[in-house]
Image (cartoon, rainbow, N blue to C red):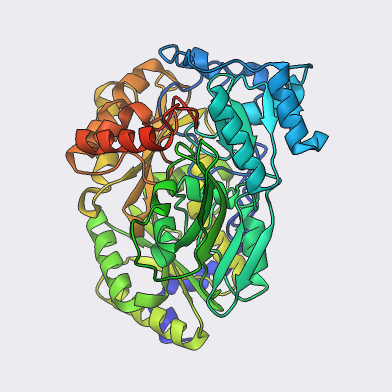
Amino acid sequence: MSRLYRLLPAARRLRIANDTLQEASFARSSAARIAAPTSPHIRWQHAQAEATTSAAGADHAPQEQPDRSQKQIKYTSESYPNIQRDSRFKELNSDDVKFFKDLLGSESAVIDGVNQDALSDLEGFNADWMKKYRGKAKLVLKPDSTEQVSKILKYCNDNLLAINPQGGNTGLVGGSVPVFDEIILNLSRMNKIRSFDDVAGVFVADAGVILEAADNHLAEHGHIFPLDLGAKGSCQIGGNVATNAGGLRLLRYGSMHGNILGIEAVLPDGTIVDDLSKLRKNNTGYDLKQLFIGGEGTIGIITAISILCPRRSQAVNVAYFGLESYAKVQEAFKEAKHQLGEILSAFELMDHRSQALYNKATGARLPLEAEHPFYCLIETSGSNTDHDSEKLNAFLEHVMGEEIVSDGVVAENETQAQNLWQCREGISEASQHFGGVYKYDLSIPLPELYSLVDACRDRMNEAGLLSADDESKPVLDVLGYGHMGDSNLHLNVSVRRYDKEVEKALEPWVYEWVSKRSGSISAEHGLGLAKKEFIGYSRSETMVRLMKQIKQLYDPNGIMNPYKYI
């Protein structure tokens, strides 16, 4: 037995624990750790109520939708009665539809609900995957080229027809579906991989390419797409860029703002922005592509991207350990950055309540027998197994020798690694298992990251809303977990049922708490419709005014994804 396992007595228990870990539910694909966990036992929404806050329902959209038919979903315009349809926008007629059909040619490129009953065909485009937002679009257009997108937008701009850009429709804040009768411009037919330079690592593809397809193509060349999401099998890379998606690889590879080398986009007036650079250095003028990254389709539609893709790691290690305090978690993170450096690819935080709820909801066995107030999962990714294992062993010896970490296990094979990851990724759906969840995606400076969870739990207790045993109390528990390496907290208020008193206690209190600590009300999910009204908690009046000026400059008629963002 190596020195590592003498120091980690729990490691030998991993083989036993993993024999039963995950047998009950939330099984993962053996191919990778990106597939979202699903279970037939999950109750996505309480039967008698639904949430009306800005809180999202999941971390990253899973590939299976909640089991709610569209007829059960209120129209977004009814859920947000303060939003009125812009009177400037024209209503579609048969002449408009004829123009688009003549332009796109193929019957499969147009779903026409103006001249015929197409409600069932439009259903999947009008509602988001969470079944929380529902629009009234009567027309879906599916162009297959940038030139077609250009002609569509020019016609719409000239005729004041509002447009809702749509990729894989896996967003979490209502940005990917219409509010009223906006035309849905779906990019699913723009799905060509244009090129990959395996020397420079530069990948160029249409915006409609599915993230998983892009990653699989890169894997054939020994590279990896620098983004990993639960919706990998559904989301499109153009939408990922338009929402500046974060995900599980951000600690190692950085954000879209750093990895995107160039974009091709179309402005509302039909102008094609030809900035599909493949260069890592191009210091000539304003870096305008950054406006489209995270712009959520409000100033134009991204039609293609050029992105830097790193080599795929050959040696991956995963460890899971228990700690006695959040202070110890911070110490462990500091040591991980210091000792693991370039091979550290993930550092995930989970509190005791999140793991206990995961265990209760799934029946899955947890890796460690003893309970700990906090748990962390770390992953290393490198090119040399012996080198990486030596560094990981040295790190674990140090943190356990210094009593920073109380106990831990290390995966010895891919199956065990997947099972350890599931303890982290299974929390999102487990938190909804007993009725529902109010979920907040927040960025908070690390020293105070977890303090919000304690403060929120105290607030629920003081309001008489929380009890683990009393069924009359709506709140079951308050838990926290997330991407420690990115200062990104997922605050979950797990409830037996959605309740107006809980919502009043949460908003705007959560955003006020975050704002006082110079945090962000949206770390990964964006603004969309859900968080539009709360942007002032993260951005100053000056910044919001500048954003509105940019919107006015590029989209003076306001046709691009209206009613959202700012």
Q: Residue furthest left?
A: 516
User: Closer to the camera, 530 or 283?
Assistant: 283
Q: Can residue 552 be seen in this view?
A: yes
Q: In this view, does 180 lie above or below 103?
A: above
Residue 187 position in % (x across, y down): 64, 43
- Quarter of the view holding residue 20: bottom right
Most extreme residue toward the right is: 107
Q: Nearer the viewer, residue 428 or 475?
A: 428
Q: In this view, does 530 lie above or below 232?
A: above
User: Residue 114: percent from the left, percent from the top?
Assistant: 72, 17
The spot of residue 188 in percent (x, y) is 68, 44
Q: In which quarter of the image is the C terminus?
A: top left
Q: Quadrant of residue 528?
A: top left
Give whichever of 327, 400 is nearer the camera: 327
Identify the residue at horizontal 35%, vertical 64% (top origin).
Answer: 284
Q: Residue visible at 65% across and 53% down?
A: 209
Q: Is residue 102 left or right of residue 369?
A: right
**253 to 370, vertically: above or below:** below
Is residue 6 at all visible to an observer of this figure? Answer: no
Quadrant of residue 110 within the rendered picture? top right
Q: Note whether 39 is above or below 224 in the view shown.
A: above
Please give the name of the residue rendered at 65% of the width and 51% of the height, measured from the top-left corner. 233
Instruction: Please give the count of numbered marks on the rendered protein.
Output: 0
Spot occupied by residue 25 in the image (x, y as percentages of width and height): 64, 47
Question: 325 or 520, which is in the foreground?
Answer: 520
